[in-house]
Image: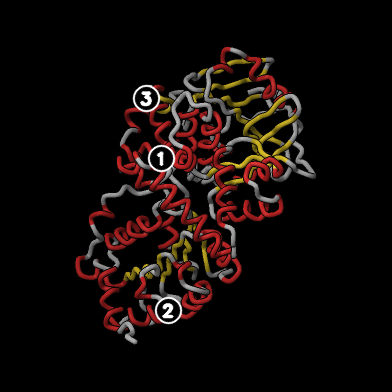
Amino acid sequence: MLSISQTEIENRLRFDNPWWDTNSIENRYQEYPRRFYFEPFYNLVRDSSVNRAVVLMGPRRVGKTVMVYHAVDKLLADGVPSQNILYVSLETPIYTGLSLEKIVNLYQGQFQHQREDELIIVFDEIQYLSNWEVHLKSLVDSYPSYTYIATGSAAAALKLKSRESGAGRFTEFVLPPLTFAEYLTFLGRVNNLIVENERVSGLYEAKDITKLNDEFLGYLNYGGYPEAVFSALIQNDSARYIKSDIIDKVLLRDLPSLYGINDVQELNRLFNSIAYNTGNEITLEALSKSSGVSKNTIKKYIEYLEAAFLIKIVHRIDVTSRKFKRATTFKVYLTNPSMRAALFGPVTAEDQAMGALTETAIFSQWFHWQNIDNLHYARWKTGEVDIVWLNTGTQKPFWCVEVKWSDAPYSDKRVLNGLLEFLEKNELADALVTTKTISDTATINSLDIRFHPSSAYTYTLGTHILSKESLEARLIKPSSGRAKGTRR
């Protein structure tokens, strides 16, 4: 039986690292625009104050490998010697069965690198190596002058193992799907469609709300994945690209292998039910009935799907912002609204699902925020509010948002009765209501209500999500967050 020789492995390493000879990355990677997340990621890579590996994780096809190549490009531009950078994709069959240390030793031998040299080593798709966390932790301890980057799409397992075995040695960095602000930036449409509010710093308005809403619709249908933004082929057949290449691989391969799931069709039926109802309130009983999956199994599957960054659970509070001791209802949001279009077909601006998808898109911007668990929704017998930010210390609401893909709340204030009741009960003085086209302010029952188009609000969220200032301190919240009765 033939075995792979050391020379073949070394040749593959040179093939995977063309900058050793050219001092540059391939043109196809240079052509992609950089994610908004690139700068904080790169700063983390270059931070030598702590001896840790950076574990870059996230859903499939959101640009993790491209961001690694962009990091290599900047490292080269910053003067790092090209032969001091190693990239290895552990998905490549030739590396099967090799330990990380063996790969590093082969690399050291090619260039006579020493233990004290400052090297940058990237292990792409690290989940393909069994017990990767043990191998990586050993390297971090054995070669502290080396910088390690590990990436992977099996986010659930990466997160679990990095915390169990890499405590104090791994730093997690999550790369989510595209924000709406990134989507417009990639298309080069920001200057044509967006303008900052002259009176309110940090608040963005539409130059042409009809055109901005057209782009928002494109974002809902295929905008969460960088490749889809630039490919008409993918946009015309998003079901094949997103469903087959992204969703199915997670549902039919990643999660079953990670958690020992035997009935993959059962998991698939559940996810389809959740995706169709994204942004709607659901119960375990209703999910069980629609998917044919038992309630106990659903609980486990939901945990797996959330850990894989496919969905996010948002919990309910009542009209006085109290949590329920025995929560029987909750909302489930897709982390990327375009997954629904891939499964059930693209939506139009007048589609019945637009309200829930708009809410999903807005929540998907918040998924990039580290304090997302502060967000809840309120529902009681006579009303509801879509987004409520609860202070973790006091468990009192700081602000709230009612999401609409309609201008009806502006002309018919009865639509806002639930929101007004919530504001009164919680002594809040103002709120934001998103609309389809209208941007204005109004005073109703001595309460300040700001109306702002959903698409412009989604853009504003995506623009500020990585701001050094906390989101709740900016005008992404309705306004001042003041209690009722206080003066401006």
Residue identifier under label 3: 211
Which residue in the rendered view is the most extreme toward the top? 411
Q: Residue at x 60, y 30 (%)?
A: 401
Which numbered disc covers residue 97? 2
Closest to the observer: 358 or 442? 358
Give the amino acid type for the residue marked by disc 2 in the picture.
Answer: Gly
SS under mark 2: loop
Against 325, is 87 above or below? below
The quarter of the picture where the C terminus appears is top right
Q: Residue at x 29, y 59 (%)?
A: 73
Give the mark nearest the N terminus, 3 or 1: 3
The answer for how far apart the CA atoms under marks 3 and 1 are is: 16 Å
Can I make out residue 217 in this image? Answer: yes
Give the amino acid type for the residue marked by disc 3 in the picture.
Answer: Lys
SS under mark 1: loop
Q: Is residue 464 left or right of residue 314?
A: left
Against 405, is 100 above or below? below
User: Can you tell which of label 3 and label 1 is closer to the viewer?
Assistant: 1
SS under mark 3: helix
Give the amino acid type for the residue marked by disc 1 in the picture.
Answer: Gly
Closest to the observer: 125 or 39? 125
Within 10 Å of the Cα at label 1, are there few (<14), some (14-19), or many (20+) other Cα atoms? many
Give the mark nearest the N terminus, 3 or 2: 2
Which residue in the rendered view is the most extreme toward the bottom? 1
Residue identifier under label 1: 223
